């Protein structure tokens, strides 16, 4: 393992998107990035699908073998507010990362220029203001599959940072054992997890992954309420069935020994700051290194089709 910069000053942003409005979501993201930068953050992480928000509870009119025109209209609005990469929104985010002087990770709904497909994607910008990583969710979960497509190519991008290799798994991708192993094989020390998962069981999952991967697990969830859904959606009955707090959050950081660096943040927006002791990563691998001395490549082999 290469020498790592000893301390990583991280900001984990648990925030509510301005649902289904990419311009206002981007403006809010920029303001939060600049705030975290002013507080010394070197790595700034925002949630899954922060632009333009996670359409929790919406069906877009899909049932098996059928769909509705109202649902199609709502999907069209969501697609319109999804982000082209590169595009005006990524340019604003890049400038904010440069001004903050930090690595910035943010989740978006990506709209592809050449087709009509959307992807649940995560972007990473460098402190120099360059877009250096685009990761698309390998397999949208459950009914997400009628909104976003499966990732195509460049499945496990890694970002070189002063604190070691950094990778990303979006929400339930982290339940894919071989996908986790694909990241471990690349030596990650920072495991980014932008998500919309406030289940209590998720907290057990993330502590296990930190232990298994001997890395820092960055759990970045969002907080939003039913009242934040905009007027004008064609599915008021679906929104009316939602709880008052739709996503409680639970963002936190877990160290390579499975211990909380920051306790989970529930039921509110906020920025969690922490100084990560990166020396814990090599120390944690003394007796267990999942792709090093504790591996048995003569018995087990993972083949990853990167392209």
Image (tube, rainbow, N blue to C red):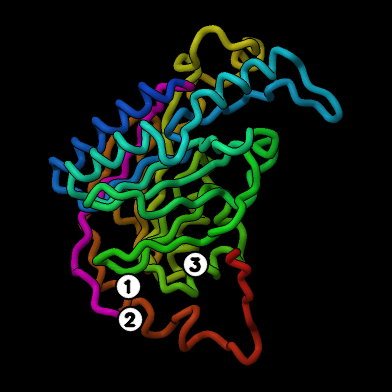
Q: Is residue 154 above or below residue 284?
A: above
Secondary structure character of the magenta stretch overall: loop
**What is the number of callouts on the image?**
3
Point out the residue furthest to the bottom here: 298
Per the rendering, the mark at residue 1 is 2
Q: Is residue 227 left or right of residue 43?
A: right
Residue where numbered disc 1 is placed: 281
Residue where numbered disc 3 is placed: 183
Point out residue 24 in the picture as x, y percentages from the top left corner.
36, 21
Point out residue 234 in the picture as x, y percentages from the top left corner.
64, 10
Point out residue 248 in the picture as x, y percentages from the top left corner.
45, 32
Instruction: Please tell me which residue is depicted at 51% across the width and 61% down the height of the picture.
Output: 156
- Specify the quadrant of the image occupied by residue 211: bottom left
Point out residue 59 in the picture as x, y percentages from the top left corner.
68, 25
Tell me if residue 18 is in the magenta stretch.
Answer: yes
Per the rendering, the mark at residue 12 is none
Q: Secondary structure at mark 3?
A: helix
Whichever of callouts 2 and 1 sits on the residue coming sooner in the sequence is: 2
The answer to which of 250 and 76 lies nearer the viewer is: 76
Q: Please indicate, yes or no, whether residue 250 appears anywhere in the rendered image.
A: no
Q: Is residue 271 above or below residue 3?
A: above
Q: Secondary structure at mark 2?
A: loop
Region in magenta: 1-20
Crowd rating for badge 3 (residues with CA inside 10 Å; few <14, some 14–19, many 20+): many
Q: CA distance from mark 2 to mark 1?
A: 10 Å
Instruction: Please tell me which residue is depicted at 35% across the width and 29% down the height of the picture.
Output: 26
Q: Is residue 18 left or right of residue 102?
A: right
Tell me if residue 301 is in the magenta stretch.
Answer: no
Whichever of callouts 3 and 2 sits on the residue coming sooner in the sequence is: 2
């Amino acid at each position: 393992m290469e020498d790592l910069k000893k301390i990583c000053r991280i900001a984990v942003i648990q925030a509510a998107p301005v649902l289904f409005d990419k311009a206002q979501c981007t403006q809010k993201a920029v303001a939060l990035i600049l705030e975290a930068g002013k507080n010394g953050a070197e790595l700034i992480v925002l949630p899954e699908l922060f632009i333009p928000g996670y359409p929790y509870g919406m069906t877009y009119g899909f049932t098996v073998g059928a769909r509705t025109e109202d649902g199609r209209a709502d999907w069209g609005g969501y697609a319109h507010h999804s982000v082209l990469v590169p595009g005006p929104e990524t340019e604003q985010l890049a400038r904010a990362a440069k001004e903050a002087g930090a690595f910035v990770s943010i989740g978006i709904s990506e709209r592809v220029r050449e087709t009509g497909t959307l992807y649940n994607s995560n972007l990473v910008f460098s402190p120099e203001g360059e877009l250096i990583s685009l990761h698309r969710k390998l397999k949208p979960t459950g009914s997400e599959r009628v909104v976003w497509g499966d990732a195509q190519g460049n499945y496990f991008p890694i970002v070189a940072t002063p604190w070691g290799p950094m990778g990303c798994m979006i929400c339930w991708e982290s339940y894919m054992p071989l996908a986790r192993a694909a990241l471990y094989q690349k030596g990650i020390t920072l495991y980014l997890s932008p998500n919309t998962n406030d289940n209590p069981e998720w907290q057990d999952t993330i502590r296990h992954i930190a232990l298994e991967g001997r890395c820092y697990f960055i759990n970045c969830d969002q907080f939003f309420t039913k009242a934040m859904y905009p007027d004008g959606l064609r599915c008021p009955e679906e929104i009316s069935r939602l709880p008052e707090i739709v996503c409680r959050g639970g963002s936190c950081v877990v160290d390579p020994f499975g211990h909380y660096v920051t306790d989970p943040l529930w039921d509110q927006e906020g920025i969690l700051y922490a100084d990560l002791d990166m020396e814990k990563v090599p120390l944690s691998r003394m007796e267990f290194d999942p792709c090093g001395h504790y591996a048995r490549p003569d018995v087990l082999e993972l083949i990853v089709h990167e392209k």
